[in-house]
Image (cartoon, rainbow, N blue to C red):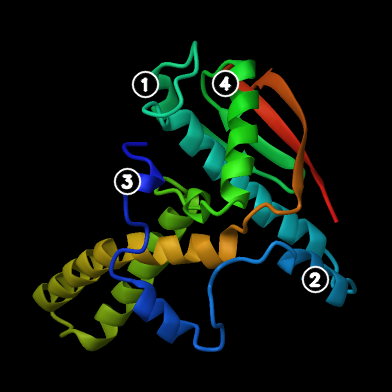
Amino acid sequence: MTQSPSGSSTAGFWDSDILDMLFPSHPTTEPRPHQDTELLRQLNFVPGLKEILMLRQVHALEHATVWVLSDRARFRFSGTATSDAQELGGMSTDRGFYLYGRVQLEDLSRAVQIALRRITSGEWDLAVHPRCGTNLSVGMLLTAGLALGATVFMPRDPIGQLVGFGAAAAAASFLAPDLGTLAQRYITTAVPFNLAIANITPMHDHFGRPTHFVQVRWLD
């Protein structure tokens, strides 16, 4: 991480006016504390819905925790070097998330609690992270779609196709960060209003790297 959410714009050219146009039926895009609880109550017959809702909230908590651990200007945890914090990575499940990288257990425990408190208190940008795999997936899909369009609409000769692919790659590179941010904000993450920290277990991954599993539980 090179900067904290408080010092960056996560919306890019997708500013609040454009978001209002994209979501005209919603007077506000701010998350509500009981929105997932209400959704689960109304659609409890949908198999796997709770797991999906929990995964989205865990994903947001994972991002918020990495932000907190990386924010050396405000949180200076003993034993966690800046270079180590920048190399942190995570993977979310519907039971909790894995945090890969060198971090002390007590530092992680404190960071998770701080992250949960901050994100549920209004710092919703903590749910979005520029290194999230969502951004990569959106970029790949966008590049593939634009490249396919280029093969259809550009001249069939090699030069025309090459120009089309180049234009598609440039457009995808420009659009992907902001579209990835929107995908994270509205699809792959949700503010973890229903989560509580259950346990943090130190372990190692298959490559011997230090890993922690942050287990969570669902609060109705």
Amino acid type, callout 1: Ser
Choose the circle earlier in sequence order: 2 or 4.
Answer: 2
Residue 17 locus on image (x, y percent) = 36, 79
Residue 207 locus on image (x, y percent) = 57, 21
Q: CA distance from mark 3 to mark 2?
A: 34 Å
Q: Which residue is located at x 32 percent, y 50 percent?
A: 8
Secondary structure beneath dot 4 equals: loop
Amino acid type, callout 3: Gly
The answer to whether residue 206 of the structure is visible from this angle is: no
Which of the two discs, 1 and 3, sits closer to the camera? 3
Choose the circle earlier in sequence order: 4 or 3.
Answer: 3
Q: CA distance from mark 4 to mark 1?
A: 20 Å
Residue wearing tag 1? 83
Choose the circle earlier in sequence order: 1 or 2.
Answer: 2
Q: Are marks 1 and 2 in contact (CB under 8 Å)?
A: no
Q: Residues within 10 Å of mark 3 (few under 14, many from 20)?
A: few
Q: CA distance from mark 4 to mark 3?
A: 34 Å
Choose the circle earlier in sequence order: 3 or 2.
Answer: 3
Q: Which residue is located at x 55 percent, y 37 percent?
A: 65
Q: Is residue 72 above or below residue 219?
A: above
Q: Residue furthest top?
A: 79
Q: In the image, 13: left or right of 203?
A: left
Quadrant into which the C terminus falls: bottom right
Residue wearing tag 4? 207
Find residue 38 and name its label.
Answer: 2
Residue wearing tag 3? 7
Q: Nearer the viewer, residue 139 or 8?
A: 8
Q: Splitting the image into 4 quarters, where does residue 22 fall?
A: bottom left
Quadrant into which the N terminus falls: top left
Q: Residues within 10 Å of mark 4 (few under 14, many from 20)?
A: few
